[in-house]
Image: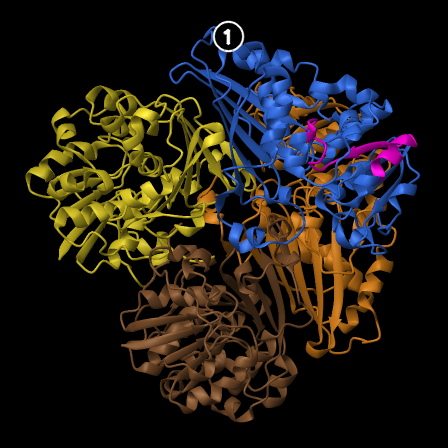
Chain colours: A brown, B yellow, C blue, D orange
Amino acid sequence: MANVTVVGASGYLGGELLRILINHPEVDEIVPVSRRLSNKSVSSLHRNLLNIFDKKFVDLNLDGIETDVAFFAAPPGEWFSSLPGLIDRGIKVITLGGKFRIKDAEIDKEVYGGYENKELLSERVYGLPEIYREEIKKAMFVTNPGCYPVSVILGIIPLKKFKDKVDLEKIVVTSITGTSGAGATPSENLHHPEVSGNIRPYNVLFHRHVPEMEFILNEFFGKIKISFTPIISDMKRGILSSVTLFSDSFDIDVNLNDHYKKHYKNEPFVRIASEIPNVANVIDSNFCDIMAEYVPDSRRIIIISAIDNLIKGGSGQAVQNMNLMLGFDEKMGLNMIGGHP
Amino acid sequence: MANVTVVGASGYLGGELLRILINHPEVDEIVPVSRRLSNKSVSSLHRNLLNIFDKKFVDLNLDGIETDVAFFAAPPGEWFSSLPGLIDRGIKVITLGGKFRIKDAEIDKEVYGGYENKELLSERVYGLPEIYREEIKKAMFVTNPGCYPVSVILGIIPLKKFKDKVDLEKIVVTSITGTSGAGATPSENLHHPEVSGNIRPYNVLFHRHVPEMEFILNEFFGKIKISFTPIISDMKRGILSSVTLFSDSFDIDVNLNDHYKKHYKNEPFVRIASEIPNVANVIDSNFCDIMAEYVPDSRRIIIISAIDNLIKGGSGQAVQNMNLMLGFDEKMGLNMIGGHP
Amino acid sequence: MANVTVVGASGYLGGELLRILINHPEVDEIVPVSRRLSNKSVSSLHRNLLNIFDKKFVDLNLDGIETDVAFFAAPPGEWFSSLPGLIDRGIKVITLGGKFRIKDAEIDKEVYGGYENKELLSERVYGLPEIYREEIKKAMFVTNPGCYPVSVILGIIPLKKFKDKVDLEKIVVTSITGTSGAGATPSENLHHPEVSGNIRPYNVLFHRHVPEMEFILNEFFGKIKISFTPIISDMKRGILSSVTLFSDSFDIDVNLNDHYKKHYKNEPFVRIASEIPNVANVIDSNFCDIMAEYVPDSRRIIIISAIDNLIKGGSGQAVQNMNLMLGFDEKMGLNMIGGHP
Amino acid sequence: MANVTVVGASGYLGGELLRILINHPEVDEIVPVSRRLSNKSVSSLHRNLLNIFDKKFVDLNLDGIETDVAFFAAPPGEWFSSLPGLIDRGIKVITLGGKFRIKDAEIDKEVYGGYENKELLSERVYGLPEIYREEIKKAMFVTNPGCYPVSVILGIIPLKKFKDKVDLEKIVVTSITGTSGAGATPSENLHHPEVSGNIRPYNVLFHRHVPEMEFILNEFFGKIKISFTPIISDMKRGILSSVTLFSDSFDIDVNLNDHYKKHYKNEPFVRIASEIPNVANVIDSNFCDIMAEYVPDSRRIIIISAIDNLIKGGSGQAVQNMNLMLGFDEKMGLNMIGGHP
């Protein structure tokens, strides 16, 4: 059994962490931390938790936390400086923000600025079990991947077998996201009347998740360049990524989807679909659904992947990492199945 | 452990039954029955179940089913005639359609026509545990309530204490529903472009759920008359019911919401909220959220209740009934918590 | 030809005013006033107007406006004190806010507080041409009705012929609204993830539009009491009102819908429908669609009405009033037809 | 003044044609043709037209139509054989279906099968005024472009100046569409519960609009190959296309968006936006909004374009063509401005 602390429990990722941890068979006490909402009932904010988790948010001195695992789902802030101490005291740390994801001090600084702790950066493990399972098992400090990167990296990584046949610098990714990915803070761009019935690309010239995708993928591919178009749509949850790569020499006898099935055959949370994935099939679950095909006419590899941005793209992923770090069954507490419809 | 059979497993209620039963700790084998889709993989239709439940639909002779519990989520049909035999053979039966809900042969015939088996009708127990828990525990044949009636009956029944103070013949109910309530068969009215961005009342002169609500409530109130307006909205799941009753003599010192809290204090799936309920808080869960207030100025009692139409209004309710009928913990398999957002 | 000034042109009602006035055959110059966005291009905010209306917002001394008509779509504020001067100088004034709608100084003060100018209040005409057309034609100062009241008052007013047969104190109104009615300012309640897939009642104990409905209707009915439930839904435009009244003595030979057709036969913007109205049919138009029926079984009169909250419930209504005040054809500039789907 | 006939008036494109033609200053009589709904009132189906256009659908012998212009918005069928006769009799014909769009008998046959009339094919003019205005003015027979091709061709055509600098065979297009594009006939894929809250790619291996885009563009570019991913989203109207092209030698001093502004400076219905387009800005209007940028880091040209699929992508486009064919002002009847929000 483990005690866990959720810092930033008032946000959407924090709330989804609570929702999952509450039903986790090996989780004992859960401490919901929020400075802003200290003393307010958790279920008055996350009203889905009414009668289930009616504790109050607490405001803790983060340096002194007594817990087995600390999740940090809070926005960037002073709490960065508490991490080394926690880790030294044997507390396992999982961060859900962008900072530390890119294990290159220069890029990390350029993209996320602020706090510099190169030592911490060198310790961190990127929390994508489909690639780094063994490292995660041994890690004290895991950085959970970004939501877009989960859908894109899981879609591309099986192609490493064919990397010499693919134009790595002309990869086009279009990702359509639900609005919860931007968090719980109201803004003009996410004001309901502006989103309802609308489709709106944003950050098409630069999105901070691109260096993350490229950094991780390039440990395996070397020189990937991603042309990324993120698009906000009128739904609250889910990411659908469409990935196009070109190959002038792809062997048309290879059944790419079968290769993906084989590649992921032991993965509990990646499903290779025979039909084109959509987000409804994965919402409220920790699954990533993927389909991959080669189209000879346009010499194009097309990959479609779908996740729930707050679960496999956030809190479910974080619990999967916790399970690995604590030696639990990796699937524990993650048996939620999405609904139909 | 129990083996269960789901007749009509290709519909939305059937699919949600599978989704819940798959994770039910005391359910062993699940047999998905569909004549139309016999031999087709369940997860090719209910794609949320991919890699989780990849069995094929089967077409069974219903008279010969070997199972502990048989759920009937199919449209009205010949299967009615198989019920007495199943029950005689000791199989517990739970129907999710409208037939048999009204234990009055004349109304039943008028509203649902067709098949007549007065004996069966007299055996049936109405599957709303908040009212008939003890009867359900002993029943061989339970009719699951309609989705609208669940939200309305649970909202009104605690008023029985005040029934002499309320104008029982002028009860106004407006219920707003998601589209999944109408089932999986495409129609012009539920063609996406006709629903998107729209709000559309229907059946305002007569809806078949009204006699059901009135019949059940009148076991306790005597002469209730409900003026019902059902409305289709641009969401796929959820029912929000707004109930207005008038009372010229209500004691303004009574805190009605507190009375509701007390009334439902032992109910695992009814939550009395301090803030106005909404459907997002209950979707993907078996909860019914309710708030009740008296407004002295207009001498109005206003009750708002919210459910997931496919869970507490359908498949979750059916599993709750199964748990009671089989002697399991009533909450077993129903610990799903909805998400936020 | 007329010159017009739109104060509060950066809001949704202001933007819709511009959209309509731009195509109005008798409108010459349009001055868009916004203190907050002064010097910013109108079409950078209302991007639907790109290449059509690329003027900049201006910040004017409201006392010195030179214009034929001044629309005030701004939130309550200091501009109240400019109105008497404008009117004295012969400028026709149309306000779109709640202040002044209730021609009763005490209620007006109670509901809208703040600024008191009883003289101004006594001059104002309520801008609902279906009731006050002749007064509007002669008015210098018109207060545009609230969006909910338009849909409710137009739905109820034809019943004045039957007022002795109806229980006037037990009128139940449920109105479902799109989110644009709450304006362009972001808030937690209208943050997209909180609205998407949701249905949420609010202000069920008191909504400021109720005294307005009651005040206007009671000029004709005497003692109407409305039990009102406003509900936010996942759409950006439209209001659907469901009105229930009880009548123990209604003549069942009266075809109520035919009475409504007759009542409104000369009204250009009220359409009596033979089928139940929905909001999609009226969005982007100045129409109010209504259906009325008597249901003998429950002795209930049910009226369904639908409007575009920003057009017949706001800016279209205001232009209709302007047309009357300036002696133009009442329909001028208002020939927009909604789309299907 | 012109008399017009709309064949297939019961579909969405037919209905939008009526909506636009009703307010067209130079259109006199409109004949709505529908075999299926003959004698049914148009406004009982297109309820937005209630009290505006209450004629009945008629079933005509198409060979004998007396009219100035005949629009064919019907599905493929026998009516193909009536076209030559109509044209011979001087009736101007505008078709809104896919047949005839590709002026290459072999591709046309392969993609659209069936009816072959090479002569008719050779006479047809592709109805995109931004490219073929002069030909349209003189044409007797215009084929209206597909909805996706409008958004994609208008987005790419200004690049012809740079065609030697662009990799023409690796063009990636992702288009997100509203559901009305698939027409008014219900289907499982467009059943509301399956679309609501969902994002779903389809036809990723082959879509019939791709040969159309390539055929038209290759009159100017020579060897374009488009990798196309169409995606259905939870909105009823609008298409947003994201186009990526690669250029290793693009001159970074060129301001691509300015080039687009210059290219389209005389076009009444193409707007080059300084901010990323979205569909809400163009819905209910005949505009195509476009933005184009070069991203040096990934050597990518990114173009975003947005249209209302039923207007600029269908009926508005058809009326624009009619205006040109009849010598009217090209903008006549097309001054609809979309709303905000």
Give the vertical position of C14 relative to D210 (above or below).
above
Residue identified by numbered label 1: C254
Which chain hosts label 1?
A: C
Q: D75 above or below B223?
A: below
Residue type, numbered disc 1: Val
Residue A31 occupies quadrant:
bottom left
Which one is in front, A47 or A94?
A47
Residue located at (62% from left, 48% from top): A193
- Residue B49 is left or right of residue A197, and the answer is left
Residue found farthest to the front: B253
Which stretch did the figure color magenta? C82-105
Which residue of the protein is positioned furthest toward the bottom in this rendering? A119
Can residue D106 be seen from the camera position used here?
Answer: no
Task: Give the vertical position of C263 relative to A77 (above or below).
Answer: above
Circle 1 sits in a helix, a strand or a loop, which is it? Answer: loop
Residue D125 lies, with reference to residue A151, above or below; the image says above
Image x and y of residue B210, in percent: 34, 27
- Residue C296 visible here: yes
Nearer to the camera, D217 or B289: B289
Residue drawn where x is 50% and y is 8% of the image: C254
Quadrant in which the N terminus of chain D appears? top right
Task: Give percent across and percent down for residue D159.
Answer: 78, 64
x%, y% of residue B14? 29, 46
Place residue C274 in its image quadrant: top right
Membership of C193 in magenta stretch: no
Q: In the image, B125: left or right of C124?
A: left
